[in-house]
Amino acid sequence: MTAPLETTFEASDAERIGGIGGRIAVFLEPEGRMETLARRVNRLTRGALARLAESEAFKRMKPGEGHLLSFPSGLAAEAVLAVKLPKKPSAEEARRAGSAIAKFNGSVPLTVLLGGRAAMPDILTGLLLRAYSFDAYRKEDPEKPAPNRAVTLMVNDPEAAEAAAAPVRAVTEGVFFTRNLVSEPANVLTTVEFAERLKGLEAHGVEVEILDEAALEALGMRTLLAVARGSESPARVVVMQWKGGGDEAPFALIGKGVVFDTGGISIKPSAGMEEMTMDMGGAGVVAGTMKALALRKAKANVVGIVGLVENMPDGRAQRPGDVVKTMKGDTVEVINTDAEGRLVLADVMWYAQERFQPTGMVDLATLTGAIIIALGHENCGVFANDDGLAEGVLAAAKAEGEGAWRMPLGPAYDKKLKSRIADIANVGGRDAGSITAAQFLQRFVKNGTPWAHLDIAGVAYRKDDTDFAPKGATGWGVRTLDRLIRDRYER
Ligand code: BES
Ligand code: MN
Ligand code: ZN
């Protein structure tokens, strides 16, 4: 992976602007007034910014969009990006401005003239998120200059800016941890390797336990183990505890970590199967959130538990028609071995409730193709047994600009899960596929546990660039969960 951007704050000094080499980003307010640093750029360029501000082009620009001035006379810099941003921008406008600056970054040093902008943290968020890329397996092109990683942020109060930037750095590092995990191919990120990488969170103060197959057997996590049977990689459950909140019960985050999903004996068609390296996305988001909480020393108790398995076809693999007993004690008829995520989550969710009696529980999973049919790649599906928690998740997602949409649950959907011979079947037919999957999970939620299920199959991984991530792993959910915990569960 390309190293993340190195951002350094420096005290505003208008006198220096003319001599700054490389590229410069500056902000222009539609309200017309220019801030000190912008005014200086305008003076040195003999009014170029003022003319832009008066232009038709500027009127047509959206807040957060930039206009490029190449080789401006009067400046040492090779280019200036003038970013349109209202005096009091929305968080989304400020993040988009940061994203525009990230796209403007080239192979020469970049200086951003922030001055006294209160929206700095959101601008920084957009800048850092969009500048990410995963190139771990690509050799460098000797013909191409290396991308610039050094960004100077000129601000009026560097010390205050550094303090305000700290939580932004924490959460974006969490997002990058998730993106890196999701981007890794399955021959590298095996269940065992995944668990090892999570162990690395101990360096940040997270307590990490790795449960091996003997331990899972002893706990009775048979449906999780049944999924793993077809693979050479053994199952692992990893328990990550962040204890920042005194002795109250923790909030629980549960993640589906299928490092590769072939479908098992109910094998998937080969076209596009390579994308199933991202089927550990839920576990990746849980891991990234734990890292963010630890880095910003969140004042909350949160436990993250992930079920790591690989779903492969093999002589030892489970078959359609098998009946398996869950840790809860209910039996499941496995109609389709490709509906494996719910089998993993059922046991992990039950374990989380038995061991921790959490104050609430959110699970994340790339659970169904049906959620992509319903919502596409713009919104994650939110299912919940508790309106307060559902609203908390939706509000946090909205504030962070991560799409989320509530989906229904109900007894009529649950009926679809009737089995010929067991307590429940693992599929409910084609209709409402993401809802029946959520109903399956709800069978493993205890009465009284507020619970939300986030089906992230459409949002965890995208084939197109977005404002905040290049194509591939998005890290969707780390910022939403971090904010949910900050707004609702922190002391
Ligand atoms: N991992 C898949 C869901 C998925 C599909 C994630 C596309 C990301 C992109 C899941 O395990 C699965 O195979 N679900 C089946 C369930 C069906 C057999 C009831 C599906 O959605 O087709
Ligand atoms: Mn599957
Ligand atoms: Zn899957």
Image: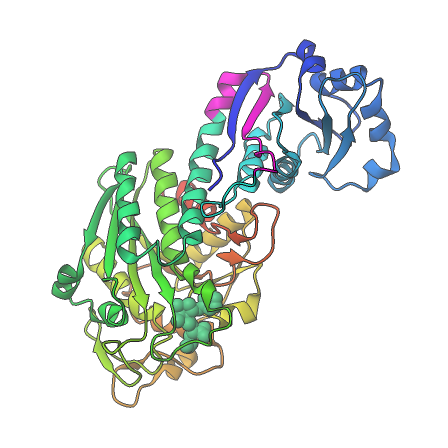
Residue under the image location 34 percent in, 54 percent down: 189
Q: Position of residue 463 (x, y in %)?
A: 57, 58
In the displayed structure, 112 sits above or below 62; it is: above
- Coloring applied to the structure: rainbow
Name, please, the residue furthest toward the bottom: 420
The quadrant holding residue 100 is: top right
Looking at the rendering, the stretch of residues picked out in magenta corresponds to: 142-163
Residue under the image location 16 percent in, 67 percent down: 220
In reply to whether residue 143 is colored magenta, the answer given is yes
Q: Position of residue 292 (x, y in %)?
A: 39, 39
If the picture is divided into quarters, which one holds ligand 3? bottom left
From the viewer's perspective, tell me whether residue 450 is left or right of residue 239: right
Name, please, the residue furthest toward the front: 142
Taking the image as drawn, is residue 410 in sight?
no
- Report the number of discs: 0
Residue under the image location 73 percent in, 27 percent down: 79
Q: Position of residue 400 (x, y in %)?
A: 53, 45
The quadrant holding residue 388 is: bottom left
In the displayed structure, 379 sits above or below 293; it is: below
Taking the image as drawn, is residue 99 in sight?
yes
Q: Position of residue 8 (x, y in %)?
A: 52, 22
Most foreground residue, 392 or 144: 144
Most foreground residue, 300 or 461: 461
Name, please, the residue furthest toward the top: 15
From the viewer's perspective, tell me whether residue 229 is left or right of residue 410: left
In reply to whether residue 405 is colored magenta, the answer given is no
- Quadrant housing the C terminus: top left
Residue under the image location 47 percent in, 39 percent down: 172
The quadrant holding residue 291 is: top left
